Image (cartoon, rainbow, N blue to C red):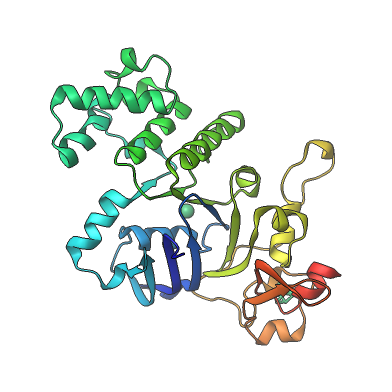
Amino acid sequence: GTPLLEVRDLHVEFKTRDGVAKAVNGVNYSVAAGETLAVLGESGSGKSVTAQTIMGILDMPPGRITSGEIMFRGQDMLKMSNEERRRIRGRKIAMIFQDALSSLNPVLTVGYQLGEMFRVHQGASKKEAKAKAIELMDRVRIPAAKERVGDYPHQFSGGMRQRIMIAMALALEPDLIIADEPTTALDVTVQAQVMDLLAELQAEYHMGLILITHDLGVVADVADKIAVMYAGRIVETAPVHELYARPAHPYTEGLLRSIPRLDQKGEELYAIKGLPPNLYKVPAGCAFNPRCDAATDLCRTEVPALHQVTDREGAELAGRKSACHLWKETLHG
Ligand code: SF4
Ligand code: MG
């Protein structure tokens, strides 16, 4: 069927005093209802800019969409009327950010802020809105919701605040949630709890979920598929377990090696050499080549296409692509 959301060949650039930064350079990805896509990359990879473009919260200017399509249920959002686009972004797609404290209003109770969704969008009375707020707080398992509905954001822990953000996103029962580093500010055990909750609610509501993260470790258990971004491009896509078991791109290999493991105590943690790319001066050829141990002359001159990945016998591996000239050696070598 038609994917819920499909980004097609999206290009976004920023014009600043330092020149033109190609933040998003031909990104393609899609997510279906009930599916979780993790978009993985370092800062400057274009993962957040892509999400902000979908949500219409990109600063324009200096940001500019130079080409591409953002299809929501088969219709290009970039060609819709402002009103139609606003309706989709307000009700059908919700976004969760990293920093709940700056997304919530510090002088209003969480109950008021949750209830506001129902007052504004559904004309609920004050009493109805409060009841809905409590129901939502229960849903995201905030203990003693009835007693805490009148509390202010600062009275909650970081993990509980992030649950409130999830409740806020769920309020209007959207088709799609985009979560940009939703657990990055939390400590590790709380991260896992919040991630599990998000995954559970996503399945329950049969929503699409796009999880944007720099941390391969936190999405392993919840994502169905992964798109790895580097310097504004997708460099690898794969079903999550296949990507972990057998990456087809040296950058993904490096990311996997950098995940701390329990059985690795004492050993020094691996880090990919070099710095994330400078978007004003993306290297010629494969953007990853200055950091790649496998780089050849071809890598320094020719941009690798996003190849369909095949097994040793040449049969296509579903959903697997790699933008590496040496993907075969990387995967099968
Ligand atoms: Fe490394 Fe070349 Fe592959 Fe880029 S194309 S990841 S430089 S081997
Ligand atoms: Mg970001």
Residue 6: percent from the left, percent from the top?
44, 66
Query: Residue 108 in the image: x percent, y percent?
Result: 23, 27
The residue under the point 44% across, 42% down is 98
User: In the figure, 21 relative to 271: above or below?
Assistant: below
Image label count: 0
Q: Nearer the viewer, residue 271 or 73?
A: 73
Quadrant of residue 274 in the image? bottom right
- Identify which residue, 9 or 102, lies in the foreground: 9
In the displayed structure image, the side of residue 331 where residue 320 appears, left or right: left
Q: In this rendering, is residue 55 above or below 202? A: below
Can residue 272 be seen? Answer: no
Quadrant, the C terminus: bottom right
Identify the residue shown where x is 60% and y is 56%: 225
* Location of residue 167 in the rendering, given as x and y in whole percent from the top left corner: 37, 34
Residue at (69, 61) in percent of width and height: 252
Residue 76: horizontal and vertical position, in percent? 33, 71
Q: Is residue 227 left or right of residue 160?
A: right
Quick check: 111 left or right of 202? left
Residue 277 appears in the rendering: yes
Q: Quadrant of residue 293?
A: bottom right
Residue placed farthest to the front in the image?
A: 1
